[in-house]
Amino acid sequence: MSNAFKTAFKLNALMEEKQMLQKARKESHMIVKCKFCKAPIRWLITIKGKKMPVDGDSRPYWLKPKGSKRIVTTQGEVFACEYEGDGKENGHGYVPHAASCSRYR
């Protein structure tokens, strides 16, 4: 295979992956019901490209490097945090649904 063909093939694959991630991010705004507990959830795409179920509503969080909780941002980043804190919150994100689902575990 020529280098030009290999480059074109890689570019095509990258474009397809980008389009798939964009579609998945648009779908993350859709709220569905958890098949186990029937709570409202949405699916976010992590920065590693994996789908993660999160609770339907966002909540404020305070970043803590060794925090006992986790938060997922709409950009797909997962941070250690606490859900309550002093001062202004660091942002709003979504709680991984596995932490709140009664039957997920």
Image (spheres, grey):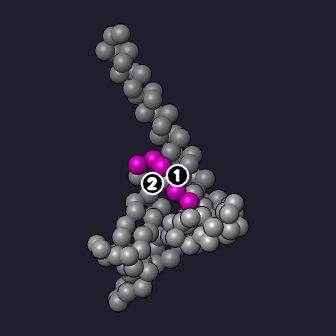
Q: Is 52 covered by the magenta stretch? A: yes
Name the N-terminal-most of marks 1 and 2: 2
Instruction: Identify the residue under disc 2.
Output: 46
Q: Is 62 covered by the magenta stretch? A: no
Q: Residue furthest bottom?
A: 86
Tell me the residue at 45%/29% (across/down): 13
Amino acid type shown at disc 2: Thr
Q: In the drawing, does residue 96 fall left or right of residue 30?
A: left
Return the residue nearer the eye: 97 or 28: 97
Return the residue nearer the eye: 72 or 66: 66
Indicate whether 89 appears above or below 53.
Answer: below
Q: In the drawing, does residue 21 fall left or right of residue 35?
A: left
Indicate whether 5 appears above or below 82.
Answer: above
Quadrant where the C terminus sits is bottom right
Q: Secondary structure at mark 1?
A: strand
Quadrant where the N terminus sits is top left
Return the residue nearer the eye: 17 or 51: 51
Tell me the residue at 35%/21% (across/down): 7
Residue 90 can be seen, yes or no: no
Q: In the drawing, does residue 61 fall left or right of residue 99?
A: left
Whether pointer 1 and pointer 2 mark residues with C-beta atoms closer than 8 Å, the reply is yes
Tell me the residue at 34%/76% (across/down): 67
Residue range (magenta): 48-53
Q: Residues within 10 Å of mark 2 (few under 14, many from 20)?
A: some
Tell me the residue at 40%/21% (across/down): 8
Instruction: Identify the residue under disc 1.
Output: 51
